[in-house]
Image (cartoon, rainbow, N blue to C red):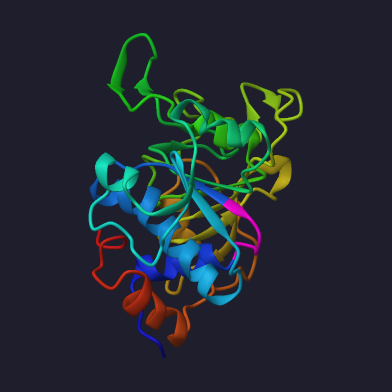
Amino acid sequence: MTEYTLNELMAVNVARQLHDDEMGFIGVGTGGRAFTVAVGLPIVAARLAQLTHAPNFTIQIGTIISPDLENIPKVFTENHITTWPTMARVRADDNLDMFVKGKVDVGFVSGPQIDQYGNINITVIGDYKKPKVRLVGCLALPEHLAFARRAFVITDHNARTFVENVHFVTGVGWQANGKSREEYNLPGGGPVYVFTDLGVFDFNGEGHRMQALTLHPGVTPDMVQEKTGFPVIIPPNVPTSILPTEEEIELIRTKIDPENILLKY
């Protein structure tokens, strides 16, 4: 059996859901594990898809479109990103127009709070006017969940992140404050998948609630429920997640991320 890390397993499962001729928008990460889930995993998945089944999948990171994934920066400072060889660049005040114009097929997102309907909070923990913790703000999260054809959530699975109700709706999922996406007139496809260290989830449960699509090897329904702050829909005989092939692991370790920059944490 092919040996793999948890990050590699997550990257492979993300890559398998990317299609040829799509464009994905990748945001920013502050560092450490936040960087891995928000930036590292999406880049590895995108490049893996290009090298296997989706050669024309492209990405946008901030103002750069289709950067050279053969030469990934060793660090992701503003200088390294802005000088990264790329096919095209857009003005800083125009980069989010790609969402509004319907150009983004896959929005890669993450966040410290996600609820059962796919609402995401990256703004505050606690009351908005007197927050316990003030987070990064909104960044491009509203655009991701409002306009992208599909939003992919990538995060670690714990009860602090997966809460019954987010404290602030930065990005709208399938239902927020008692109103559906249709009532908010949001044109995008909304959150489609959640990729975690426990499994892969979608929102095809009753009322667009989060449900288990696959569980990673060794993960049980009880383990998932213990680390989730709301009842998770777990179908009987839920299948095991797609396992990496020897070829995929070889590509990740020798061609995509040989210095373990993207999947380090």
Residue at 51% x, 41% y is 230
Q: Quadrant of residue 58?
A: bottom right
Q: Which of 72 and 190 lies nearest the eye of the viewer?
A: 72
- Placement of the C terminus among the 4 image quadrants: bottom left
x, y percent for residue 92: 44, 30
Task: Please give the range of residues in magenta.
Answer: 17-23
- Up-down relation of residue 195 to residue 54 (above or below): above
x, y percent for residue 89: 47, 42
Q: Quadrant of residue 197?
A: bottom left
Does 241 lie within the magenta span? no
- Up-down relation of residue 263 to residue 131 (above or below): below
Magenta: main secondary structure equals loop
Q: On the rendered structure, is 154 left or right of 213? A: left
Residue at 65% x, 42% y is 103
Q: Which of 126 and 183 lies nearest the eye of the viewer?
A: 183
- Up-down relation of residue 81 to residue 246 (above or below): above
Q: Which of 129 and 148 lies nearest the eye of the viewer?
A: 148
| Residue 256 visible in rendering | yes
Task: Count up the numbered dots.
Answer: 0
